[in-house]
Amino acid sequence: MFILKRQDVEISSIQHPKKDQQVPVLRYQTQTFRLISVFSAAQEEEAKLFWRDLTDNRGKACVLLEEPDRYSVWGKIRLERLEESVIKMTGELPPCCIQASLLLLQAVYMDIEDLLGARQVAAFRRELLAVFRQYQLPQADQPEMIDQLLDVNPLALVQIPSWQENQLRALLQALHQIGKQHFGNANFVERAMESLQDLPIRERDAFSKWLKRSTLAQLWH
C-alpha cells in the first residue's frame, strides 16, 4: 500500500483483548493499522522486502512507516472489532467512552449550576458522590475527587479513570435519573449531548456506537 512518514499518521495504543499489554495502533486518514514488525534505520532494505512480501505476495493491506531512527510495518485492522474484543474480554473501555461520559457529567452539572442555583448544585454533588460510592468507581469515592472530575477538562486529564463498562453504564443511567429529578424532564439531555462536540470526530463516533449497543441510547440521544 503506502510508505508513510511520521507526520502523516497518528500513533496511539489500545489494551490487548487477551494479554496484559498495550497494542500500538496507527491511524492514517480513516484507516487503522496494527504494528507487525520493527526494523532499525540500517535495515531499510529488509523492511521494504518484508513489506512488499506482505502486500504483493500475501495480499495483506499494510503500510511501511519511515522514521529517522527506524522502519516499521503495520497491518490494517478494523479498530471497532478490536475495541469490542477488549470490552468483551476485560470489561475495559476505550478512553474516549470515559471522556465522553465525563463531558456529559460536567454539562449536566453546569446546567444545574446556571439554571437552578447553589442549593441544587450542592444536592447534585451529594447524589453524585453516593452513586460513585455505590458502584465503587475508582478515583471517585471522595468529595475532592468529585471536584476534580467536575472541574478538569476530560480531554486534558493526565490519568483517565479506569472504569469498567458496567460501572460506566450505571453512572450514565444514574446521571440521567438525577438530571430528570432536578429539571423535572429530560430536556437537559440535548444540551448535554452538545458537549460531545469537544471530542474528535473519531472518538465521538466510537462513543456513539457504544451507546447504541446498549439501552443507554434510549436515554442519551
Image (cartoon, rainbow, N blue to C red):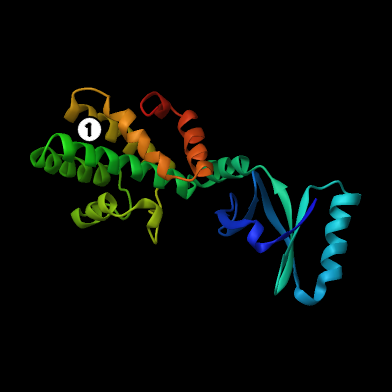
Identify which residue is drawn at 25% across, 29% down: 177
**Which quadrant holds the C terminus?**
top left
- Residue 21 at x, y = what percent? 57, 60
Which residue is at the front of the view, 110 or 163? Answer: 110
- Residue 111 at x, y = what percent? 22, 37
Give the quadrant of residue 12.
bottom right
Which residue is at the front of the view, 149 or 169? Answer: 149
Left or right: 105 as drawn, with respect to 198: left
User: In this rendering, does residue 164 appear at all?
Assistant: no
The residue tagged 1 is 178
Which residue is at the front of the view, 150 or 86? Answer: 150
Left or right: 57 as drawn, with respect to 151: right
Disc 1 secondary structure class: helix
- Residue 25 at x, y = what percent? 63, 54
Residue placed furthest toward the bottom = 42
User: In this rendering, does residue 27 appear at all?
Assistant: yes
Residue flagged by tag 1: what amino acid is it?
Ile
Give the quadrant of residue 70.
bottom right
Left or right: 141 as drawn, with respect to 153: left
Identify which residue is drawn at 22% across, 32% down: 178
Identify which residue is drawn at 20% across, 43% down: 130
> Callout 1: few (<14), some (14-19), or many (20+) C-alpha neighbours within 10 Å?
some
